[in-house]
Image: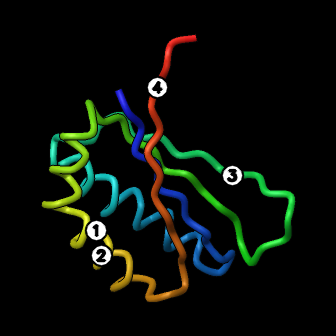
Amino acid sequence: MLIFNTTYLVPDKHYESWIKWLRKDCIPFMLQSEYLRHPQLAKVYAEEAQDGESYSVQFHVAGLEELEKWHLKYANEFQNMLRTKFGQEILFFATVLEIMDL
């Protein structure tokens, strides 16, 4: 099991429109693929000053093969959705985390 994590730097002036977009457009888009599931949102606390706040949006995905399929089919459309709505105002990056036994 993997976690597909996207982290966003959201300027304070865009928070309300970003959270609305996240709930109404982004998460439904991500879930409709059936590769990603169990979305969760977390605020990222950073020690250094930044323009706005960082947020992590995470989804469970079965494995790298499923994530690659999602990426090939949906990643460009996802990036276009974000850029169409916010331009360069909201920065983001993605990471993949592997859930491990302790």
Compare marks 4 and 1 and give the one earlier in the sequence.
1
The disc placed on residue 81 is 2
Of helix, strand and loop, which one carries label 2? helix
**Residue where numbered disc 3 is placed:** 44
Residues 23 and 61: in front is: 61
Q: Is residue 86 left or right of residue 75?
A: right
Q: Residue furthest top?
A: 102
Tag 1–tag 3 contact (CB < 8 Å): no
Mark 2 residue type: Met
The residue sitting at 16% across, 41% down in the picture is 34
Quarter in which the N terminus is drawn: top left
Point out the frontmost of discs 4 and 1.
4
Distance, label 3 to label 2, CA atoms, is: 23 Å
Q: Secondary structure at mark 4?
A: loop
Which element type, helix, strand or loop, lies under badge 1?
helix
Q: Answer with left or right where residue 98 lies relative to residue 34.
A: right
Quarter where residue 91 is shown: bottom right
Q: Earlier in the sequence, mark 2 or mark 4?
A: 2
Q: Amino acid at mark 3?
A: Val
Q: Which residue lies under the disc numbered 1? A: 78
Could you tell me which quadrant the C terminus lies in? top right
Q: CA distance from mark 4 to mark 1?
A: 24 Å
Please say if the residues under marks 2 and 1 sit with CB atoms less than 8 Å apart.
Answer: yes
Residue positioned 56% across, 70% down in the render: 16
Sooner in the amino-acid sequence: mark 3 or mark 4: 3
In percent of width and height, residue 96 lies at 43, 45
* Residues packed near mark 3 inside 10 Å, few (<14), some (14 to 19) or many (20 plus): few
Q: Which residue is mark 4?
A: 99
The answer to whether 23 appears left or right of 74 in the picture is: right
> Whole-Å distance between the Cαs marked 1 and 3?
22 Å
